Image (spheres, rainbow, N blue to C red):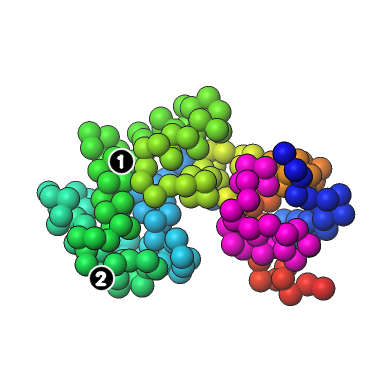
Amino acid sequence: MPEFLSTSQATQLQRIAQRYKKPVKLGKPWNQRTDDELWRKVLGQIAVVGRAEPGERLQHDPKIKRLVSVKCLRRFQTDADLQKHLHALFVKLRVRYVGRNWKSDRKSAAAVKNFRKLTAGDSPRKFFDRVAKCKSEAEKIAMLQRELVFFGNKSARDSLIELRLAKNVMALDARIYGVLRKVGVRLSPDDIYRQIEKELIEKVATPLGMTGALLDRVLFKNYDQILKQR
């Protein structure tokens, strides 16, 4: 397997991470969150594909939070009615890649399936309790990708990082790839995901005494400032 990060590139990334790591805090652990908070994290992974702002509103806008609460959504007895509701909300939030017709919209359909998975005879907290009991981080990633719709390499890892269910993973996205390009790493999101993740953890995070999760958030949250550096 070819390596992507040279020693000098890894050193540049270490300097960037050192500069910005102090103010960055990880989110609350999953077991300190309510069912609604956990469900919104899952829903948000669907909403943010293509555009991050709708995900922020899902997490913080009081009116939107009420419209997607577990109690509110449980009132929809059929999947069709629930999908209509979520589709209308996605359109209102200007979520990217949402179809005009709710029947053919993949994002709202995925949201329905994930809601039913988390609440069918169970609760979001119980679902994530099962995730937490997986023996390894790789098993946790595999479980999320297996049981939740629209969860790929990035969204599974991002959820685990946000909920403090994994330490040495990274949710590689366009921003982090942008930071890598800044230090001269030439690759694309189509490159081998696990190899890039492995090198960032081994060559950048570990020498600094950081977890991959913290490095992920440092690069993601300080993306604009990092790109402005000379």
The residue to which callout 1 is attached is: 118
Q: Residue at x 26, y 50 (%)?
A: 112
Q: Residue at x 78, y 56 (%)?
A: 13
Q: Earlier in the sequence, mark 1 or mark 2?
A: 2
The image quadrant of residue 9 is bottom right
Question: Which amino acid does the dot numbered 2 rest on?
Answer: Arg
* Residue 59 higher or lower than 192, as above or below: below
Please say whether residue 25 is visible from this viewpoint: no
With 221 as the anchor, is 199 left or right in this view?
A: right
In this rendering, which labeled residue sits more in front, label 1 or label 2? 2
Q: Secondary structure at mark 2?
A: loop
Q: Residue at x 47, y 35 (%)?
A: 142
Position in image of residue 220 (x %, y %): 62, 60
Position in image of residue 93 (x %, y %): 34, 71
Q: Nearer the viewer, residue 69 or 90?
A: 90
- Where are the magenta residues, as a range? 173-197
Q: Where's the C terminus, which quadrant?
A: bottom right
For marks 1 and 2, give the CA distance: 26 Å
Q: Nearer the viewer, residue 28 or 77?
A: 77
The residue to which callout 2 is attached is: 100
With 82 as the anchor, is 216 left or right in this view?
A: right
With 110 as the anchor, is 133 left or right in this view?
A: right
Q: Is residue 193 magenta?
A: yes
Q: Secondary structure at mark 1?
A: helix
